[in-house]
Image (spheres, rainbow, N blue to C red):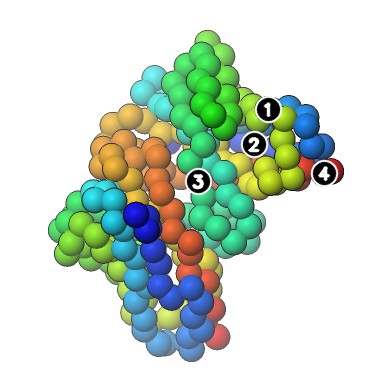
Amino acid sequence: LAKTTQPISMDSYEGQEVNITCSHNNIATNDYITWYQQFPSQGPRFIIQGYKTKVTNEVASLFIPADRKSSTLSLPRVSLSDTAVYYCLVAPNYGGATNKLIFGTGTLLAVQP
Amino acid sequence: NAGVTQTPKFQVLKTGQSMTLQCAQDMNHEYMSWYRQDPGMGLRLIHYSVGAGITDQGEVPNGYNVSRSTTEDFPLRLLSAAPSQTSVYFCASSHDRFFPYEQYFGPGTRLTVT
């Protein structure tokens, strides 16, 4: 499974756009990129998933360059309630290895008023 | 739908005691998993199941047993608790047994072993 690297923490202010980048230099052809969000004292929550280019949903956008060695989670106009830990995961789209989704330590995003 | 439920929310055990953490989901998901989360270490996969009667080991299976007799339930058993098993335990499920990228997590069980 590809190893991921994220910043340990980031700070932002309300109303700003936040971009969290994840490095996955050893990503394989069959690997998909998934992001989760975790609030204190809660289980993680799925945010978004992608394979290449750009994916957007009601919560966030995911940008993946052509070489796929990194990905960027973009949160538009964050609020205090976006303060959480964000995890980047990489796993292949076939059974066996995919069943073992591995969470790293994530990025703690702190949003200030 | 209640989603994924876990009981108990909190538990204190003495070293050597046994207990079962309960996990249930009402979404008819075939895939279920157990994670533990320790401070500064993210989540680590303990065991998972792709359907009733099928279980497999994750990253840190030692000291834990699981079984899956029904689609809805996936209990995690600690046979002889150790202080190293003090952690927050999360159960999760997914509608896709082959590509379980989108998992729904329960609220967690905070376990302390003294």
Secondary element at image label 3 = strand
Identify which residue is drawn at 31% across, 36% down.
B99
Instruction: Name the image quarter holding residue A15.
Output: top right
Q: Nearer the viewer, mark 4 or mark 2?
A: 4
Separation of disc 3 and disc 2 at Cα?
18 Å
Identify which residue is drawn at 20% across, 51% down.
B51
Q: Are marks 3 and 4 on the same chain?
A: yes
Q: Is residue B65 left or right of residue A79?
A: left
Residue at numbered disc 4:
A112
Q: Answer with mark 2 or mark 1, whichever residue precedes in sequence.
A: 2
Q: Residues within 10 Å of mark 4 (few under 14, many from 20)?
A: few
Separation of disc 1 and disc 3 at Cα?
18 Å
Q: Are marks 1 and 3 on the same chain?
A: yes
Instruction: Give the vertical position of B95 relative to A52 (above or below).
Output: below
Residue B53 point in image, percent of width and height: 15, 58
Question: Three-letter amino acid code at disc 4?
Answer: Gln
Instruction: Name the image quarter holding residue A63.
Output: top right
Q: Are marks 4 and 2 on the same chain?
A: yes
Q: Answer with mark 3 or mark 2, whichever residue precedes in sequence.
A: 2
Residue at numbered disc 1:
A76
Whether residues under marks 4 and 1 lie with C-beta atoms below 8 angstroms apart, the answer is no
Q: Is residue A83 visible?
A: yes
Question: Three-letter amino acid code at disc 2?
Answer: Gln
Give B92 or A101, whichever is nearer the viewer: B92
Q: Answer with mark 1 or mark 3, whichever residue precedes in sequence.
A: 3
Give me the disc on residue A6. Answer: 2
Q: Answer with mark 4 or mark 2, whichever residue precedes in sequence.
A: 2
Instruction: Give the vertical position of B20 relative to A111 (above or below).
Output: below
Chain under label 1? A
